Image (tube, grey):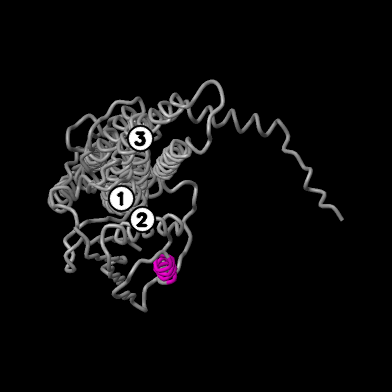
Amino acid sequence: MKNSYTNLKIPNYFINRKFIVERTVRRILPRSLFSRSLLMILIPLIVTQTISLELFYGNYLSTVSRRLTDTVGSEVEFIVNQFNQTNSRVKYNQIIEDAQKYFQYSITWRKGQIFLGNSRKKSNIIGPVDELLNQTLTDRLDERFVVDWFSIKDQVKISIELKQSVVDILIPKKKLTAGSVWLFIFWIVGSALVLFIMTSVFAWIQFRAIRRLSRSVEKFGKGIDPGNLHPDGSRELRNAAIAFNVMRERILRYVKQRTVILASVSHDLRTPLTRLRLSLAMLPQKGMFNAEEQVQDILEMITDIEEMEQMISAYLSFARGEGTEEPVLTDVSQLIKDCVAAASRADTRFLSVEIDHDLPDLIIRPHSIRRVFSNILDNAKRYGGDVKLRVHMKGKGIQFIIDDDGPGIEIERRESVFTPFETGNRQKGTGLGLSIAKNIIQGHGGDIKLETSPLGGLRVMIFIPR
């Protein structure tokens, strides 16, 4: 039975809605990565500080303020009860003195005054202490009262209506406050601002490396060589800068080599083409001629054509490089044995072949690596005689050492022979074998070097990392 959901299509309404939401978000969010990173830092910082403020204001400050207002409310209730239980002026004065002595309250007794006030009036004090004090006094007193937070500095004035009198109680504000709320708010805002500035500076330093990398890539994409990029910043940014430098060097080398190829093709093919033109021009144009008399000329033309074919084949191999071959997990030991067997069939004499038994498999392009060893072993046979081969583990990779007993290459020319069309000897050849080998080995992240062999000839050392 066919699945009924296979032909299900998403309605255009949802697609358009998603597009509108994404476009709106892109308009709201900043464009640069640095600004978005700062936003990622700022939002959690604000949320964290808001939660801290809420915990302080809603939990700690409320609890402490409730305890302080309960204490003040009970003391005010005690004083009011004392006033209500006596009619003696002497007793009134004693109550006032005791309140000053034990509670640090300043009390003014206004006999015959009329109470004017609204106990429901809001004071707009930061924090919950004003509301808690009003609620405590409302619960404890039957009399009308009013609380004034602003008339007298550092004191709270509570006016209470008694029998034909009014009592004004001045309470120090320090008995009602757990500390400066403004100081805590300043600490919250100040610490958040300092942290944001510090993280912004660190982020700017990190993103400076990204901006340099972006500018270098943009210049290089326009054909302007920005030079090597100095690795800076975190490990990932350093790796990105190093990868850019490696990519830049490979591209520049690639372009240089292809330019040299074009120049060398036109130069090297000109000589055999000129000889072919002269040979064709020397052939009889009219009448009858003896073909046997032209055998030598025909053989020379065939030789020129074969020479051009070899040149073109070498150019194509060099230009192709590794081609489109995909890296695969390869048994290196078996690959080397196959190369040795093929070289032996081509009359290469091996004095010894040493291959470690515990060589790991490598992810390589086997045909390209086989081409490298074929070129090197062919050079060893052509310019030397006997060959030694050793393959062993070295660090985090495999090292290949090929020695021959030929004439070798002078020390001062061991770097230049890797240049395309540089042979390093006086024999005929295109000079592309070592160039092709170096390109392939470097494409695998490895290295190839030339040294003096203990056999008296040339030693080729190849290292391919795992």
Is any part of residue 156 visible from this angle? no
User: Which mark, residue 375?
Assistant: 2
Contact check, label 1 and label 2, Cβ < 8 Å: yes
Is residue 190 magenta-colored?
Answer: no
Q: Quadrant of the N terminus?
A: bottom right
Q: Which residue in the structure is indicated by mark 1?
A: 434
| Spot occupied by residue 50 in the image (x, y as percentages of width and height) | 35, 43
- Who is closer to the viewer here, 240 or 96? 240
Residue hosting label 3? 261
Q: Say whether residue 279 is left or right of residue 350.
A: right
Sequence order check, earlier mark of 3 and 2: 3
- Separation of residues labelled 3 and 2 (CA atoms): 19 Å
Q: Quadrant of residue 111?
A: top left
Cα distance between the residues tagged 3 and 1 = 15 Å
What's the CA distance linking mark 1 and mark 2?
7 Å
Query: Which residue is more in the foreground, 374 or 37?
Result: 374
The quarter holding residue 416 reads top left
Q: Main secondary structure of the magenta part?
A: helix
Q: Is residue 283 above or below residue 370?
A: above
Q: Secondary structure at mark 2?
A: helix
Of residues 91 and 358, which is closer to you in this image? 358
